[in-house]
Amino acid sequence: MSEKMYLRMKAIAQVALVVILHLGIITFLRIKTEEWQEVEGMEMVLTYCAPVFLLYATCIRSLKIKKLRYNLIWFLISLLPSVAILFKLKEAAGAEPSESAFIVFHFEQGYLELMWFFPVVYSVIQLLLWASMWFMILSKE
């Protein structure tokens, strides 16, 4: 098996591990997903296609460097900030708005946080990781 194919398979396995861990955390936190049956599978795929692609691209970049610390940095940055965001979203779901505002987001349904907020923030995290990896690589050369 070629090195490129081995690299791709390893990246797919690592991305799958991160996705499974995120789904486990969402299940553990009991973020309400069963209440919004109107969401179709295609909408879910389209929403999460960019974050998963960015996750895969940054994983490939970290694996091409062939140093364990870059891969460990990738794993920690791909998991820890998003886990903190999920915990904050769960906390916001239980909180009542303290004062009246012009726009009030209701985090009770699970739809807004999992279909809009979380993918956007996760994509930004992965883009920042991508840029920082390029800077680390360029500074070494």
Image: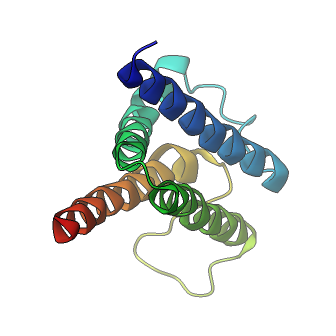
Looking at the image, residue 37 lies above or below residue 64: above
Relative to 116, is 23 on the left or the right?
A: right
| Quarter occupied by the C terminus | bottom left
Relative to 104, is 135 on the left or the right?
A: left
Which sits in the foreground, 10 or 33? 10
Whole-percent x, y for residue 106 in the image: 59, 61
Residue at 56% across, 47% down: 114
The part of the image, by quadrant, that contains residue 49 is top left
Looking at the image, residue 38 lies above or below residue 20: above
Whole-percent x, y for residue 75 in the image: 55, 55
Which sits in the foreground, 36 or 22? 22
Residue 30 in view, yes or no: yes
Number of numbered callouts drawn: 0
Residue 31 in view, yes or no: no
Looking at the image, residue 42 lies above or below residue 92: above
The part of the image, by quadrant, that contains residue 90 is bottom right
The part of the image, by quadrant, that contains residue 81 is bottom right
Residue lying at the far top of the rendered structure = 1
Q: How is the image coloured?
A: rainbow
Residue at 46% across, 12% down: 1
Which sits in the foreground, 25 or 69? 69
Residue at 45% across, 55% down: 67
Whole-percent x, y for residue 105 in the image: 51, 64
Residue at 37% across, 35% down: 53
Relative to 137, is 51 on the left or the right?
A: right
Whole-percent x, y for residue 44 in the image: 51, 28
